[in-house]
Image (cartoon, grey):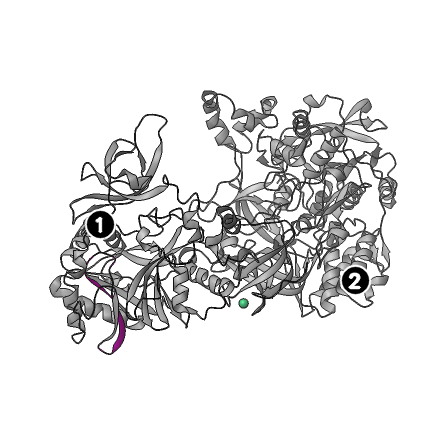
Amino acid sequence: MSNNLRINKNNFIDQTVRISFKFNGKKLFGYKGDTLASALLANNIHLVGRSFKYHRPRGIMTCGSEEPNAIVQVGKDPALTDPNVRATEIELYEGLEAFSQNCWPSVNFDIGGINNFLSPLLPAGFYYKTFMWPASFWEKYEFFIRHSAGLGKSPTEPDQDLYDHQFVHCDVLVIGGGISGILSAKLSAEKGLNTMLIDDKSYLGGSTIYQDDDIFKINNETSNVWLKNQIEKLKKIPNLKIKNRTSVAAFHGYNYLLARENLTDHLSINERKEKIRQRLLKIRAKKVVIATGAIERPLIFSNNDRPGIILSSSIKKYIDYYGVKTGENISLFTNNDSAYETAISLNKSGVKVKIIIDIRENPSSILSEKIEKTGIKILRGHTITNTDGYKRIKSIDVMKLSKDGENVVGNKTTYKCDCLGISGGWTPMVHLFTQSGGKLKFRNNDNVFIPDENKTPSEQISVGSSNGDFELDDVIINTVKNIKIFLGLDKNDYENLDIKCSKEKQKRNIWLLPSNKPISKSKPFLDFQNDSTAKDVKLALREGFKSIEHVKRYTTTGMGTDQGKLSNMHALGIIADTTGTNMGELGTTTFRPPYTPLTFGAIVGRNVGEFFDHTRRTAIHDWHVENKAEFENVGQWKRPWYFPKNGETMYQAVQRESKAARESAGILDASTLGKIDIQGEDASEFLNRVYTNAWSKLAIGKCRYGLMLNEDGMVYDDGVTTRLGENHYIMTTTTGGAANVLSKLEDYLQTEWPELNVYLTTVTDQYSTMSICGPNSKKIIKKIIPSLDLSDESFPHMSFKNSKIDNVNCRIMRISFTGEHSYEINVQSNYAKDVWEKCIEAGKEFNITPYGTETMHLLRAEKGFIITGQDTDGTLTPSDLQMDWIIGKKKYDFIGKRSLYRSDTIREDRKQLVGLLTDDPKEVLEEGAQLVESLEKPIDMLGHVTSSYFSPNLNKSIALAVVRSGKKLKGKKLIVPMENKNINVTITDTVFYDKENKRLNA
Amino acid sequence: MFIINCPYCGERDQTEFSCGGEAHIERPKQPTELSDDQWAEYLFMRKNIKGVQFERWNHIHGCRKWFNVVRDTSNDKIHAVYKMGERPPVK
Ligand SMILES: [Zn+2]
């Protein structure tokens, strides 16, 4: 380090603890308490990045979350690297490694810097306009632009850090630990209210905690000493929780807030192990106090973006809090009194301030008088017209302003400096207020948008500078007064404080400062991160954009990761000036959450990997695993997909399973099908109303297939329902539809038909179901339950019997989804695996073959049975599915009945379910493939394939499809055009196998 | 994210509920008597206004009961909650 930029006087940095870190590969040192930004500045490093569009050298400009330039990549580890982090917010830790972003190959030599010289070619809307160029032209630029654009690099491997979520309930939430937040939290907690105080910094006290000057006194103590004592007392209150390093990201209705608590980012890598990195707090507060403060505005003049140009209040914080000089020869440029506070701090620390350029004609206040006594030169009514210096500011050009502020007059004087502090006034941080639904009002005298107390959502209040109070006495008096009313407090100690401070006397604001050069030859930057200038805004206005939201998007002003925290007000001001509008009428752009960027890790918390969603496993799952099943996700369920043997492919396994099921015996775990127990004296009437077919006459002990529609007449779900008793049914639904069907039925029962005495209970998990099918299924059941009469007379197809397997009660249904003679055994789930194993054992001599969902789908497709959700998509009526037989024509009403003869549902050219056979029986179609009649353009799409398989039992390819007017097109030849060939198909019946249903009773 | 006062369980987070759209649209008792237009009016037409709206809500992750809510859609303020079959409060 050539210059010693660190001073030794302050209390906030522990200079006994040296911390080493690396920036762009170079090893550097800082101290405990530093941020990366303060440590870099102490090492005389200002240049930290390149701007987004022109790749201009950019330096650290602020000391907080509004930082537009000093945005770095932290860490190299491909799983843990963190892009787009503000150096001003990174607390220094041992081993920190950070890199500049958006520069290539290095921050000092950056190829994209050529954009700076091309900048006349890159005006507002450049990217939009570029895309309209001829494609061939664009391609030449694409490589270059892609390489240049974008900010940090995202991690390439899964994040190994731990994140957590926590629900927080409190009476009062105070956001912001500055002086107004401290007073609010203390008053609230002392009243006995359960209070939480949140601040994004590692310490409390905001900017007052380092305001150490006689001008600012409370009860005869300097304001920092007084506040420090208050904080000490505050920390002892038991019903107050303090969360430091915590940033509120979003403020939603009903006082629901999301905050991100940083727990380990400030620790050395070794100390972080197995700790939670960040916690997302989900806060419900009865009352919310917004005390988020204000941020300083820059000033807009040509070349106001050079490294070394820093917000004046940040220079003050670097010297007062971190003990870091941001330069040896500092000048200040201001339109308000806060630069004078900075000058006082610098002066005390022995840093030379050569001049203060103030655009005001007569800024006389206690502060300015004190400055004049020190001999610092104040140039009143002057402005900076230009700056010089490439990687660091070298000099400024100063000229006198005309009376009206529209021009500069007289001669230009050039002053040398290595750092320039700028202050354009203050902007209250109203982001959270507006997120919560609050509306702003414009205060003309100092050009700020502040919360409108008449348009503030209930149970919240804004205090301090976020409410537009900038002077110490106003902050304290108004905070105490308003909190007293807000919380219903009695008289308190803070009402009669003796407060001394300086008062600003004159205000003058010029959004875009004039220059001796035409604007076309100047570069007055507005949005430092996105590189948009005042010129761009003016161009957008000339091109006809009027709304602030449009200008913002066209110029990209305010669209960086800082969301325009520094730039929005100036953009608004320039639009208002140029168009002659009042800023209050113009309104602001919308502030959207998050206030500062959130990590994806914090958002998802523990809900990653296996915890991302629930996994449901059947009671027989372990057997499937032992028998090497491949699984398919069906909703949350894991279902066996197929059971490969000896290295079979899925196709081979399914062909084998399908053949075995029809030739001898197959067994399927059907436990995932939804099961709803229906009881009550009106159960039959209820089923009559929800299914399309008739139910009243179904005898006890019989089963029936039912189709359920939506009120719009479209098929919704299907399944077999069994009458167990006079007033007792068990309904099965599809696996995926189970929860929704139950909800829908509950809805009708509770809201439309409360007169029906019916009770619905889901028993999906309580019962497990195994389906044994095939010509030998009867023999297997006979072996397991020898006493059961399985004759067709006693136990015909579509009937049910209660029975016992050993001592286990079971319900046996003779129903079939494969077209084979088959039985479904339902047992209480805790016996299911045992019963399943008995079936397997009994079936061994018949080569009983376990099969999964794929074979089930194939077998039912051979029979033309639909799967709702695969062959249907909510746009098909029963008639479209050629299932008119299931409509109870005589029934007066059922859900969806009236819709079945709406003009649209009786159209004959609706898409209808058909079978398809390929001309080449070996050719298997792709599900989803389109069907056309001819390849002549324009090609008319007639429909698409919904199910397709190679049938081993028919030894040919079969498919189901929906086709426009399909019912009438039997025998018609269609074409399935694929990427590399056209497949010829013929429309057929939907039933391919055993059309006479002989096998059901085989 | 608002809080709903379930008439059966008390105040719960919105995430426990699902919205069933506009309330007090009764399913016609005799659908077959209706013209296509009348049926379509019941089937498809919903107001979805900005302002005070009567809605059906279901405490789906709680007691599973349906009930009615009077909510201002512009600011999510809930003015009243009442059970199915109960008379709606006057605006
Ligand atoms: Zn409830």
The outermost residue toward the bottom is A807
Q: Are marks 1 and 2 on the same chain?
A: yes
Task: Report, in whole angstroms, how far the alpha carbon at label 1 lies from the one at label 2.
Answer: 76 Å
Q: Residue at x 31, y 51 (%)?
A: A883
Q: Position of residue A836 (x, y in %)?
A: 23, 68
The outermost residue toward the left is A845
Q: Residue at x 72, y 32 (%)?
A: A575
Q: Position of residue A14 (x, y in %)?
A: 64, 55
Inspect the magenta stretch and tell me whether residue A821 lies in it.
yes
Q: Residue at x 55, y 59 (%)?
A: B56
The relative height of residue A507 versus residue A493 in the rendered view (above or below) is above
Image quarter (top left, top right, bottom left or bottom right) of the N terminus of chain A: top right
Question: Which SS class for mark 1?
Answer: helix
Q: Residue at x 23, y 71 (%)?
A: A835
The residue at which mark 2 appears reads as: A485
Tell me which amino acid carries mark 2. Ile
The residue lying toward the viewer, choosing from A32 and A153, is A153
Q: Which residues are magenta?
A: A806-824
Q: Is residue A955 left or right of residue A538?
A: left
Q: Position of residue B55 (x, y in %)?
A: 58, 57
The residue lying toward the viewer, choosing from A730 and A161, is A730
